[in-house]
Image (cartoon, helix red, strand yellow):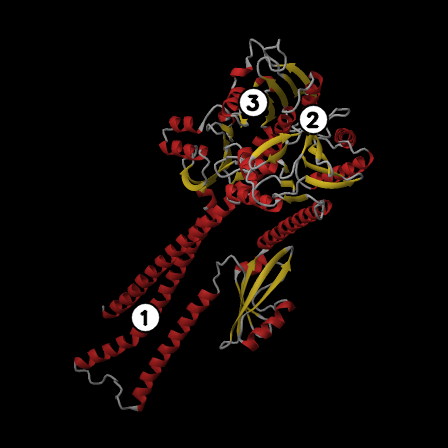
Amino acid sequence: MKNRGIVFKLISLILVTAGIFFLIVSNHNAKKTRSIFKGNLRNSAENLSYSTLNKIETIIKAVEKIPQQMAYSLEGPSHTKENLLLLIRQTVENNPELYGATIAFEPYMFDPDALYFAPYFYKQKGETKFTYIGSESYKYFSWDWYKIPKEKNKPMWSEPYFDEGAGNIIMATYSVPFYRDIKGKKQLMGIVTADISLAWLQEMVSSIKIAETGYAFLISKEGTLITHPRQDMIMNETIFSLANKFNQPELHKLGESMVNGETNFISKKHLFTGEDAWLFYAPLPSNGWSLGVIFPQKELLAGLNKLQMELRIFAAGGLALLLLAIWFIAQSITRPLGVLSKAAEEMATGNMDTPIPEINSTDEVGRLANSFRFMEQALKKYIQQIKDISKLPGENPNPVIRAGVTGNVLYANKAATTVLEGWDIKTGNVLPVIFHELIETALNLGENQEMEVEHKNKKFTFELMPVIESGYINIYGRDITERRKAEEELSRITDEKNQIESEVKMATLVQEGFLPEATPDIPDFKFAAKTVPAKFVGGDFYDFIELEQDRLGIVLGDVSGKGVSAALYMARLMSDFRYVAMQDPQPGNIIRQVNDIATRRSRKGMFATAVFLLLDVKSKKVRVCNAGHHAMLIRRGDSEILEAGKAGGIPLGIAENVSYIEEEVQLFSGDLVFLYSDGVVEPMNDQKEHFGMTRLRSMISEPSGTPEEILEKVENAIQTFTRNAPQFDDMTFLMFKIL
């Protein structure tokens, strides 16, 4: 009874202690692992979402620029009907991302006898079609695409809509108001629109797949589902209608957060499966649409949960084996005590013949000592067996091998014989030669050794751990094939990224190399110019062309699009301006000839806006001609801002044989002339507000400072306004002052 009591107490103590320790370690490891996993998932979600948003934003910004430049070109002198139709048609045909475009005029503004005038070109089955959209049945003045930009006095994206007449596709419209100075008053002339199909957007977002049930979706500024795996929901549901339908107030709050342009990573129930999920959402800067990505927790954590369960089962099995071994050990310890107790009981009955050894007898002490030695040996044996069991688990899915000094196999688990098939790893056989040198090194140094081996198109890593006192090596192998593939793919992606960055840097250097190294040094004049590149290589340019008879040609332009192609297009235009100006220095003729050259060799969809100045240094007169670009600003006196050379023609590269109008301006001492590109007035802050003309005029109206100082002030003001947020267009400034 006492013997059983000792064994029971020993096992109970070890079981409780080991169990508590295992639970603490297991729970801590599970929480820590989940925390690390969630953090890594959030980083991956942000990278995936922002990568998708940047791709969408690049396309959206490119589309926005098309009607904006059309609007600039319409703010000058009146265009003929033929020029307008040619401008719209060429714009639609040269820009594959457009479905259609129109210039819709205010009542009686284009034709005193016409209430409606809105020519519309669109694509249908590979052909360009034409119609007039204004009529008594379609009063476009009351439609949102016309009314809202007019009321808010700024460009606007429409809500996505389903257009049956466009071939049953989802579309969106970007509307830009344009104005004209009539009797000194800025008056609205009409609205320029660009229609785009959102099929590419749906395809881009729907391609995002997360596990089995994870997906991405896009909602409009009003919460309408633009893309979603459920086709029946697209354009038929809003995030708010779904909240009401499924009675989920938290979904309504989520919708408010998304349409307000917020960014977050939250836990949320999957709308259709009811399972726990993570959601990351972020806005699209240009139009306030919001992208959401659903990450199903159960599916993403399945592998991690399985691994933790396997570890618990393996640990429980090891604990059971440990307790069994301890039971045998306890029995071997208590058995001699039982023999002595029985002998004592025999003596207590009066049987004095019981051979009880004397305490001081050598034979008796020896037998007792031997008993304890046997017990000690048995205990050591069992302990060693326990160590061996823990070091060489038969159920380990990875190869585990014990080898002698000569490389002979002393033990090999099942995984070693199956995973390393072909090496014939069995007890008694010799390991391949590649192991022998490392075995010798590990035993001589008493330090662990590692090596990586490729076997049958798989890659393995082996760790050799010497047991010096026993003179053998424990070898633990792991299959790292998939890890190496992942590392190689990461290396490939990194190399591609570095190559792209290198090419962009090279293109930037090429672009910078074409720009003037210094401004002209002319008495009574002070010049300054600067280009601030955006994220991508752009097509902004400026140049000073010294001509005969004390004349200076000045050109500033903006090429549509970004990247290396835009930079090369820019370089060709600069060369064209220099060549033509040397032959015929008249601004109108220069613009016309450069436009003809650019149109003949123009790549599809490429065009540019530009303004050319011919400055007579002696008379201080400047003649200016504009091709769809911003007007030249003149600060006269202390604060008065004048405009000259308003947009009077279509951009370069769209159509040949176009006439352009010149304007002559007399400059005076103290006048400050300012030229600029779109990137100066279009930067946005986190409130989706543009820097705009009002702020620009305020900056250059300040009388103090050299041209260099004023340019620096404008640049700093833009950076402060945007809070150094990334911009998608270059900023180009050119300024000169008459002393």
Residue 55 visible in the displayed image: no
* Residue 547 falls in image quadrant: top right
Residue sticking out furthest to the right: 583
Is 321 located above or below residue 551 in the figure?
A: below
Q: Crowding at label 1, few (<14), some or many (≥20) Cα neighbours within 10 Å?
A: some
Residue nearest the observer in this picture, 97 or 612: 612
Q: Which residue is mark 3?
A: 185
Question: Marks 3 and 2, how far apart in space?
Answer: 23 Å
Q: Is residue 254 visible?
A: yes
Q: Secondary structure at mark 3?
A: strand
Badge 3 amino acid? Lys
Query: Dot 3, how many residues are within 10 Å of its Cα: few (below 14), some (14-19), or many (20+)?
Result: few
Query: Which residue carries the number 2 mark?
Result: 650
Mark 3 and mark 2 lie on one chain; the one further toward the N terminus is 3
Q: Please name the residue that numbered disc 1 is placed on.
A: 330
- In the depicted view, which residue is nearer to us: 76 or 685? 76
